[in-house]
Image (tube, rainbow, N blue to C red):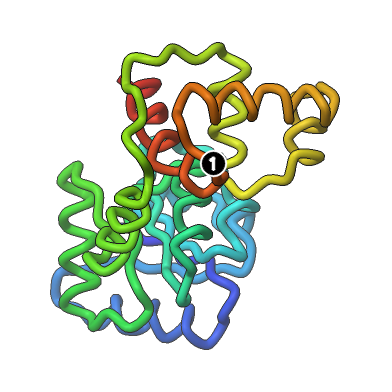
Amino acid sequence: MKILINISNLLLGRALQELLEREPEAYQALFVADVRQCKGFRPDFLIVDSCTIRACLPFPDPETKIMLLDFCLSEQEMIALLLSCKIDGIVATTADLPLFKKALERVMAGQIWIDNNKIKAIVRQGGHTRNINQDESFSKKERDIIMLVSQGLTNKAIADNLHISEQTVKTHLGRIFRKTSISRRAQLVPLAMKLRVQNST
């Protein structure tokens, strides 16, 4: 299994490379400070962190699985990354080597790997959301705004991203809040995750 490691902590990156290369399963690991340095190396996995992920994506080979190392990400940060980037798994830096290898194997088999504690936090956050009318239809612009709000963007950043005015963003948000009977931006996260799943099927 070929693994390309591109994380901001150089010491941890090199240590992870050495640990993987010592394993009898014949991992071929390469640590680089910049993914452009890996010409000719076609990895099965790209290991990134929240600081390096945006510079790496989209990765040239769409078959490469993306594993995010979790350096104590908040639930909101993690959800924003899940919604905005193609991530196949998230592993805490506190995970031991057997658990890390298990995560790689599961993701390689086509599953998604996220630490149980993070899943529980997402579920708890979703539990605070009032019942959203699942039959409500959203315009394309409303869907775009739901996704961008869930990524933590401000109204101004959303307006810039969608090339509309801030007032138009506020109007759309008001309509979304009425349709869903919610009152806080964070409550849109579970809906954004549902919309993302619908869009990918």
* Quarter holding residue 130: top left
29 to the left or right of 147 = left
117 to the left or right of 164 = left
Question: Is residue 40 visible to us here?
Answer: no
Q: Position of residue 163 (x, y in %)?
A: 81, 23
Secondary structure under tag 1 reads loop
> For the point 54% across and 30% down, which residue is it?
177
Above or below, 47 relative to 147: below
Q: Quadrant of the N terminus?
A: bottom left
* Quarter holding residue 119: bottom left
Q: Quadrant of the C terminus?
A: top left
Q: Position of residue 137 (x, y in %)?
A: 44, 12
Residue tagged by mark 1?
183
Q: Position of residue 129 (x, y in %)?
A: 38, 44
Q: Residues within 10 Å of mark 1 (few under 14, many from 20)?
A: some
* Quarter holding residue 67: bottom left
Above or below, 160 relative to 102: above
> For the point 62% across and 29% down, which residue is it?
145
Above or below, 201 relative to 3: above
> For the point 45% across and 52% down, which residue is it?
79
50 to the left or right of 157 = left
**Which amino acid, by three-letter code, is at mark 1?**
Ser
Q: Position of residue 139 (x, y in %)?
A: 55, 12
